Amino acid sequence: MEESPYTKVPNSILDFEGLDVYEFRILILILRKTIGFNKKSDGISLSQFIKFTGISKDKVIKSLENLQKNKFISVQKQTLKNGGKSFNRYTPLVLDKDYLVRQKDKGSTSERLGLVCEKDIQKKIEQKKIDKRREREGYIFFSLSEKEQLKEIDSYIQNLIYESEYIKNQKGFELKIRKQLSKGDEEQLKDFEKWYLSKTCEELENKYSGKYLDGYLIDSIYPYFNSKMYDPSNKFTMWLIDTKTKEGYSENFEDRNELYKTLKRVTDGII
């Protein structure tokens, strides 16, 4: 069986961890074009790098700059006989195992510092994601089940259409609102929350006003933004009246589940 042609690449290069995936692939191509043909250097065009590595032009240029800067390769600019530009000639400098060891030791300190910096940046990114998720979860929309979201979005959109004087493209309008809510658009989430809380409180007030909770008369149920000094973490407020003293006080609820659980104790009269 005829042996397939191959390029002898030193294990020290394959085992070296100081390159990113793009730099490594480009370095391997340079080795293929040089030692693969028993040459010390070779002229390689950008189009060849792009074709054989599948890497974009910008990443190819950046990777070649990094390889040259870190002395993995040398680059010789070439010109045509008529003075025009030609593709560069590349010479690999990494065939010596000791060279790679020196490069690794040289970069170890900066790599450690870079790693610390990268970790700090990553932590900040993750914290921002957590903060954003917590912020999103604070809206009533994300406390609804998927089935409830679909149902309430339909009602919400119909309400917007009803209140709008003129919508040229109704289908496009609906898609826009659905996309904004699903992606967590802050303004749309606020508008949805006001609509949802207002209509839910109105429904509950119609059902429970005049009934009793633990001996107190339920006067009204309203959303947090109807109070002058409100706390948005409490979505619902119930105003209760002591029938003996005629004094009133508020009961606040962080979410609808907490409110619904409390409403299970409601009675038609004082027990």
Image: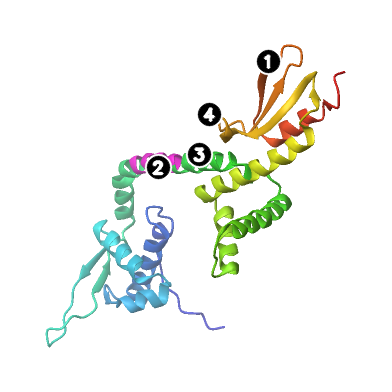
Label 2 amino acid? Answer: Ile
Q: Does any portion of residue 144 appear in the rendered image? A: yes
Q: Is residue 267 above or below residue 193?
A: above
Q: Which residue is drawn at the image coordinates 60% and 68% (left, top)?
A: 171
Give the Cα distance between marks 2 and 3. 15 Å
Mark seen at residue 79: none
Residue that badge 4 annotates: 228
Mark 4 and mark 2 lie on one chain; the one further toward the N terminus is 2
Most common secondary structure along the magenta stretch: helix
In three-dimensional space, the C-alpha distance between marks 4 and 2, rounded to whole angstroms, equals 41 Å
Secondary structure under the numbered disc 1 in the rendered image: loop
Crowd class of label 4 (few under 14; some 14 to 19; many from 20; radius 10 Å): few
Using a 10 Å C-alpha cutoff, classify the residue at mark 2 as few (fewer than 14 neighbours), some (14 to 19) or many (20 or more): few
Q: CA distance from mark 2 to mark 1?
A: 55 Å
Residue 117: say if magenta. yes
The type of residue carrying mark 1 is Glu
Spatial CA span between label 3 and label 1: 40 Å
Q: Amino acid at mark 3?
A: Asp
Q: What's the colour scheme?
A: rainbow
In front: mark 3 or mark 1? 1
The residue indicated by pointer 2 is 121
- For the magenta stretch, what is the residue range? 113-124
Q: Nearer the viewer, mark 4 or mark 3?
A: 4
Q: Residue at x 39, y 42 (%)?
A: 115
Which one is in front in this view, the residue at disc 1 or the one at disc 4?
A: 1
User: Circle 3 is placed at which residue position?
Assistant: 131
